[in-house]
Each structure stands twice: as structure tokens, then as C-alpha cells.
Amino acid sequence: MAVNNIFSGFPGVFRGELFDKLLDHSDFRIERIVLNSSSSDEAQWLRRKRAQWLMLVQGFVVLESDNERAIEVKAGDYLLLEANSKHRLRWKCPDDETILLSVQF
């Protein structure tokens, strides 16, 4: 049995965003998403075929969806993005790494 840590195991240097599959199963996928200081604000619109449960582990972001106003999300907050919903990162804290946990199902 291996023990891993959500806060470690990043590559030494990376630009922008890092998507790290923690578990990939036929029914769901768990990913760690890390945004560093060079990640751009106002990212492109995304649309996933699967529903996505997101929890902000570290940092502060503002998410925007096509049918709602911008939502401020702080560490410990979580939300559900319905399948095929359009969403994007509108803003993130520029000084710190931002870590999200994503469960897609």
C-alpha cells in the first residue's frame, strides 16, 4: 500500500496548469489540478462530457459558468458542475499555487 500526499509530487518547474490523474476508473476519474503563478486569468471556456465535483484544497479562485454569475471559491469549498455545463476560471490568486481536487463521473 502506497501513501501519497496531495501537496507533494509536483514536477520541479512547470508553467500554467498541471493535471495529475490520481485514480482512473471506468466509472470515475480523480484528478489533482495545480495552477501556479504563471497560469493566466480568464481561461478559455471548458465543457466536460461528465459531471465534475470540484473541491478547492488550497488557494482562492473565481469560477464562472454560462448560466450563473461568477462564484468565489475558497479553500475547503466544493461544488458540482453538471455534465456538459460551460465553465471557466475567471481569476485566481496570483501569488500562491492553487490546488483543486476533481472527481469526474
Image (spheres, rainbow, N blue to C red):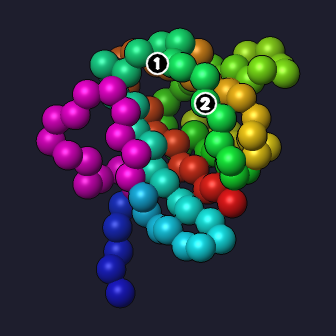
Q: Which residues are magenta?
A: 6-20
In the image, residue 57 sits, relative to residue 62, either above or below, namely: below
Question: In terms of image quadrants, where is residue 36?
Answer: top left
Residue sitting at the far bottom: 1
Q: Secondary structure at mark 1?
A: loop
Element class at badge 2: strand
Residue drawn at point x = 65 percent, y = 42 percent:
48
Residue 18 on the magenta span: yes
| Magenta-colored segment: predominant secondary structure | loop
Residue 76, given in percent of the width and then of the height, sits at 62, 42
Give the mark nearest the N terminus, 1 or 2.
2
Q: Position of residue 24 (x, y in %)?
A: 50, 68
| Residue 28: image location, x then y, percent | 62, 66
Instruction: Name the residue tied to disc 2.
Output: 46
Residue 39, quarter of picture: top left
31 left or right, relative to 20 = right
Cα separation between marks 1 and 2: 20 Å
Camera-nearest label, 1 or 2: 2
Residue linked to disc 1 = 93
> In which quadrant is the C terminus drawn?
bottom right
Does residue 105 appear left or right of residue 33 in this picture? right
User: Which residue sits at x=41%, y=15%?
Assistant: 40
Asked whether 48 or 29 is in front, the reply is: 48
Considering depth in this image, is 103 or 72 the residue closer to the camera?
103
Mark yes or no: residue 14 visible: yes
Along the horizontal axis of the image, is 78 left or right of 2?
right
Q: Nearer the viewer, residue 31 or 62?
A: 31
Depth check: 95 or 67 in front? 67
Image quarter in which the N terminus is found = bottom left
